[in-house]
């Protein structure tokens, strides 16, 4: 029983971290940033 509570707590923390990462990625995308574009157009090879 105690092991299940510990596993649940770790799972909740993991889900919270994943949600924060996804939220950050969405915010960056809305601000014109993305994983494929560093924002430096001089180095862009036309991938977009």
Image (tube, grey):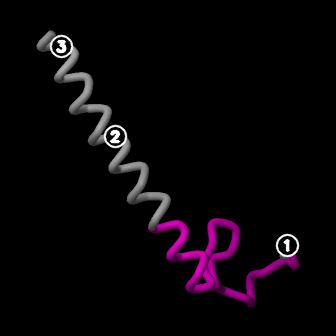
CA gap between label 1 and label 2 equals: 33 Å
User: Which residue corresponds to mark 3?
Assistant: 3
User: Which residue corresponds to mark 1?
Assistant: 47
Mark 2 surroundings: few (<14), some (14-19) or many (≥20) residues within 10 A: few
Which residue: 68% across, 75% down? 37
Residue 13: image x %, image y %?
A: 27, 42
> In which quadrant of the rendered view does residue 40 lie?
bottom right
**Furthest-bottom residue in this view:** 42
Quarter the N terminus occupies: top left
Up-down relation of residue 37 to residue 39 (above or below): above
User: Which residue corresponds to mark 2?
Assistant: 14
Instruction: Give the left or right position of residue 27, taking residue 39 as reference.
Output: left
Is 43 colored magenta in this rendering? yes
Quarter the C terminus occupies: bottom right
**Furthest-top residue in this view:** 1
CA gap between label 3 and label 2 equals: 16 Å
CA gap between label 3 and label 1 equals: 48 Å
What secondary structure is found at the residue carrying circle 2?
helix
What secondary structure is found at the residue carrying circle 3?
helix
Mark 3 surroundings: few (<14), some (14-19) or many (≥20) residues within 10 A: few
> In which quadrant of the rendered view does residue 32 lie?
bottom right
**Highlighted range, magenta:** 24-47
| Tag in front: 1 or 2 | 2
């Amino acid at each position: 029983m105690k092991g299940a509570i510990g596993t649940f707590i770790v799972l909740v923390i993991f889900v919270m971290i994943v949600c924060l990462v996804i939220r950050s990625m969405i915010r960056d995308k809305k601000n014109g940033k993305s994983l494929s574009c560093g924002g430096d157009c001089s180095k862009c090879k036309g991938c977009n």
